[in-house]
Amino acid sequence: MSDTTIHRSDYRPPAWRVPQVELEFDLDIDHSEVQARLHLACDDGEETPLQLDGESLELLEIALDGRPLGPLEYRLHDATLEVPGARNGSVLSTRVRVQPAANSALQGLYLSGSRDDGFLLTQCEAEGFRRITFFPDRPDVLSRYRVTLRADATRFPVLLAGGNADGHGALPDGRHYACFVDPWPKSSYLFALVAGRLESIRQDYTTADGRAVEVRLWAEPWAITRCQHAMDSVLAAMRWDETHYGRNYDLAQFHVVATGDFNMGAMENKGLNIFNSKYLLADPDASTDEDYAHVEAVVGHEYFHNWSGNRVTCRDWFQLSLKEGFTVFREQSFAADMNDPTLQRIADVTRLRQQQFAEDAGPLAHPVRPDSYREIDNFYTATVYEKGAELVRMLAGHLGDAGFRRGCELYFTRHDGEAVTIEHFLAALGDANSADLSPFLAWYGQAGTPQLHVESVYEATEQRYRLHLSQTTAPGPHAAHKPPLPIPVALRLLAPDGSPLPLRLHGEHAAQGTDRVLLLTDTTAEFRFEDIAARPVASVLRGFSAPVALHEDSTAADLALLMVHESSGFDRWQAGQRLARRAFDELCGGDRRIANTAWLEATAACYADPRWTDEPALLAEFLKPPAELELAQSLSNWNPVAVRTAREDLLMRLAETLGAKSLRARHALLQSDERGAQNGTARARRRLKNQLLALLLHVDREHALALAQAQCTDAPGMTDRLAALRLLVHQQADAAAAALLAFQQRHAGDALALDKGLAVAATIPGEPALARVQALLAGPHFLPHNPNRVYAVLGAFAQANPTGFHRADGAGYALLAEQLLQQDRINPTTAARLANAFAGWTRLEPVRREHLKDALLGLSQESGVSRALAEMLARLVGPA
């Protein structure tokens, strides 16, 4: 294998294209054979020899234009097949053998589940198709596929591939076949097949343009009854895309398949989506309210890819955010329309701050469009997905709803059937609106989170309010100086009574409404507002209008006023988070209690306000300060134990302010009405109820633990059961061991539910976590070949348990390093993703930092590690 770094600047269009592909599969668990006929076209006068990618393939036959080739007529080396004799119009035929059961990397064709009951499937994004047959495996080679599958009819009664069904029947010796034709050209990463014992549910759908579509969701027999929510989500996504983007589905069938063994969350293969079961199956007893939301969102995401990724795809993998960032934005918009838009925005921004901001601040920082990579699988990151979505949101906000819709229409029409770049996307949006969006391209090429600084001066005599904005972005290993970016800053000014003020900028003849978006394009800028009768309170970056870190000169009283009077629920929450952060800083840095008092009083006022009765889920979010990992991001000498202690102190102060009596009464009221319903109102009430229980723990521990024990036993659904179990286990209550055992016994046959219980055990705070995780790794439930199980144990421990993983003695780092090497031999993708847990090491306090650095250096000196893990280690160690 080559370790060559791939650079975006080296891109060249493919010399050879493959307009038509014919594939024939003879499928079996241990050995499957693949016959491929590639119809070739050459665009450079045949000066470049035909080169095809191929990994882990046993070449059995090769022929050119029907003539078998001798050993001297082709070259097979370094995962490349070269055929010098190929000409424009030639047909290259190959027959290869692959080993699905031995393919633990879960890329290409592999076995999911056991030999007796499992099924065969493929995963080709990003470079898995080269593990199926020899091919120019790059996204800018678009082909039409005809696929024939053959297999034993008893062992593999269901045969599926992308495209439309085109015949099936029986074969001798108990075998059968099925054919599929995809009329739309697609990249090789979008190829898929599935073969096995599966059952399905079906729904017929008629598109807005009158096309009849058969929608089928497939799963193993034990899981098929848990697919109805996903089916409802598919139908909702199809209608939503028609309504909001004018995009109709374009095949006669749409298949979705669930598997328990998958590296990703899901995959948008044309006409045959494949999902990690975690994001497709749902029922109240085994799935939380969060699971239901994830299923709906991910189903929408993969369906929306049919246009933003399939019909219009990316030219090269550097453009990955062209399809992923855009589609995440579409997914988030869909989820907001289907549910509560305020809660959805809170979830989106929280995820960005906790995951992407941390990525931007560490050694794994990279632009949304990277300049180079060794393994593209390492760049399926929060930066590409979440920050990429925020960039699309900025563009949509800049153009307005109608303008963005016009731009997307032009983009899809202009580039249908093409592989394009981010520049093409910006050009289409701009051309449809007579706007130059090229300045926004800089966002895609610059790593790091811009720091937005806001300073204000009120001039009472002139009744003028001056707002000074400035931006900086910290230098990184690849850029000592980072130029300013265009930052849209949504703004509202509130009067002392909380009412919004009409806004007239200096030079304007009249006020232009109460809401403005100020575009900061330089390092600094000042905006002067006239006719402001009293010192206002600025609500800055409303709706989180740009993915920046905000530093403002608002007082604690200002933020408290915003918490109570902002009309936007999201911005009330955002003000509360900023104020809670200041309260945390006070606890960490001194004896002042100005922000603490303001946060506690404002939060208590919201808690007591009867208007919040109709917004229980939002109130629950108000009662949570930022998470430990988010609070730690701005600390240069991060001590996880100190951060947790200060945050727990905040929660205790809040609980004392609200009062044990009030918490007990309100929790009891919500508990008595709980019936396990799956509507929005029931989910919102559960969210508040469980947050109240967590607060009650700080002021009435014994009563809270008793409530948790009863809830864990009697809860009508997984949301309450898991919340209570987590509280018992993390508090090391006397009933914790019995509750955890009962949970495991109840869900022993349900891998996804069992994952939840294992994650709870792996995230017990503090030093006890290490021994608990070691026991889990040695126990009967740990499955090292299953990514979901690995993430439930090792991922939860290393990435979601800062006080357990970051032990002062470095034992957590040693355990993860040992497990990374073992996992790397099984599944390099999983190992590389787990290595992300080391990304924050440069911000740790010195003792922990040295322990983690030693673990990283030891790993980087290991020989024989995969390319994926080697690249991650090089990036992690490099900046030190």
Image (cartoon, rainbow, N blue to C red):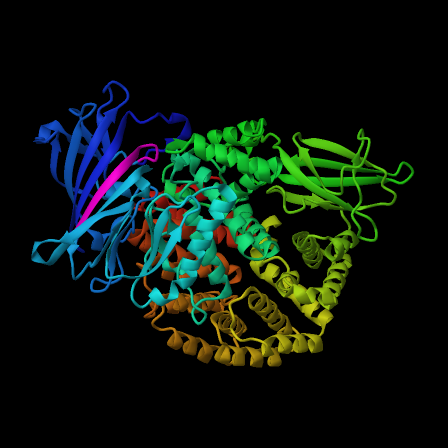
Is residue 176 positioned above or below 515 on the image? below
Is residue 561 positioned above or below 874 on the image? below
Q: Residue at x 46, y 37 (%)?
A: 322
Q: Residue at x 72, y 40 (%)?
A: 454
In x, y percent, where is residue 389?
Answer: 52, 43
Q: Quadrant of residue 261?
A: bottom left
In x, y percent, where is residue 189?
Answer: 32, 41
Q: In the drawing, does residue 328 fall left or right of residue 755?
A: right
* Foreground residue among 216 and 764: 216
Is residue 173 positioned above or below 651 on the image? above
Can residue 161 be seen at all in this image of the molecule? Answer: yes
Q: In the drawing, does residue 110 fall left or right of residue 687?
A: left
Q: Quadrant of residue 28?
A: bottom left
In x, y percent, where is residue 832?
Answer: 38, 49
Q: In the drawing, does residue 345 fall left or right of residue 62?
A: right
Q: Quadrant of residue 5?
A: top left
Q: Residue furthest front?
A: 210
Can residue 395 be seen at all in this image of the molecule? Answer: no
Which SS does the magenta portion mostly show? Answer: strand
Let me know if residue 144 is in the magenta part. yes
Let me know if residue 347 is in the magenta part. no
* Foreground residue among 384 and 209: 209
Is residue 417 positioned above or below 779 on the image? above
In x, y percent, where is residue 502?
Answer: 80, 42
In the rendered image, which quarter contains the N terminus? top left
* Magenta span: 138-150
